[in-house]
Image (cartoon, rainbow, N blue to C red):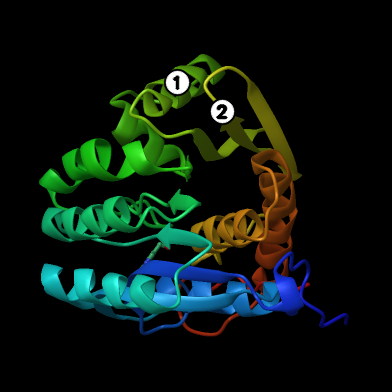
Amino acid sequence: MNLRPILSPNPMNKPVKVLSIGGSDSGGAAGVQADLRTWALLGAYGMSALTAVTSQNSLDIHAIQFMPAAFIRSQIDVIFDDYGANGVKTGFFGRAELVEAAAAGLQQHQPPNIVIDPVLVNHKGAAMFRGDVLHAYKTLLIPQATIVTPNLNEAALLAGLEIKKWENVQTAVSHIHALGAKYVLLKGWREGDQMVDVLFDGCQTERFTTKYIKTENLHGSGDTMSASICAFLAMGEEMKTAVARAVPFTHQAIKNGADWQLGKGHGPVWASR
Ligand code: PXL
């Protein structure tokens, strides 16, 4: 295996710096654990501002301890006051005041690449947020996004419509784009044995197609996709190239873990190079 960082445009071959604002998954599959694993693999220097600590395994989330909003803001501020970041990814918040704290931090520090993974529905289709969170996402976070990366269920919630046909996909991405994100990536539209991830820039729709993999082991797939996009953008890639690299990277991660039985429930994806 080639262990060199994939790409590093920084002087003196220093790694790019990326920050994950999201939750800890004690089971190690998703959240900040997946982001840091992805970034280490891609040769980026990963940092984290924890929004919550979840007590979960492959079967269920048992308990969540939310961080105080001011403490999230403190983690963000100290990182920017010292390291700075070439890219930021946001993940799980669960509470509106935590979205507000992160949005205010991003507004102040203005990092160059902001990837918003709107963690609203998990890989099993279960809701992961309280009602007022959706409003905070739409008004405070998505308007700052370089790219927002909803799955099908999250896109339906953000756009306020059902997504059953291809026309609905197109309407949904334009509704979400209108919230203020530069790009929208709607993940996981299925066409027969193909999975299509749809990138929309406000004008054009670009389709990224991979073969559908039949597996229950998808925990962390969304994090892996958005974290890899964040790293590629932070390294200086154009959006289309970043997505064109992140899609097969995530596909391979799903393939790697597809037959694993680490726990009794939904297993993780496993990124590799
Ligand atoms: O994969 C979305 C996600 C993000 N962050 C945390 C999670 C999950 C899904 O379970 O637990 C902390």
Q: Disc 1 marks which residue?
A: 174
Task: Determine which quarter of the picture holds residue 250.
Answer: bottom right
Q: Position of residue 71 (x, y in %)?
A: 16, 76
In terms of sequence position, does the residue under pointer 2 or pointer 1 come before the other? 1
Q: Which mark is residue 148?
A: none
Viewed as shown, does residue 253 lie left or right of 20? Answer: right
Q: Name the residue under label 2.
A: 200
Position of residue 26 relative to residue 156, above or below, is below
Quarter of the image holding residue 138? top left
Vertical comparison of 57 with 179: above or below: below
Query: How far apart in space, not on screen, are marks 2 and 1 (Cα)?
Result: 8 Å
**Residue 172, above or below 268:** above
Classify the position of ligand 1 by quadrant: top left, top right, bottom left or bottom right: bottom left
Tell me, yes or no, if residue 34 can be seen here: yes
Amino acid residing under circle 2: Phe
Is residue 66 found left or right of 126 in the rendered image? left
> In the rendering, at what x and y percent does residue 265 appear?
45, 74
> How far from the left and from the top, in percent, is residue 110?
38, 53
Using the rendered view, name the quadrant where residue 14 is placed. Answer: bottom right
Can residue 59 be seen here?
Answer: no
Asked if marks 2 and 1 touch (Cβ < 8 Å), the reply is yes
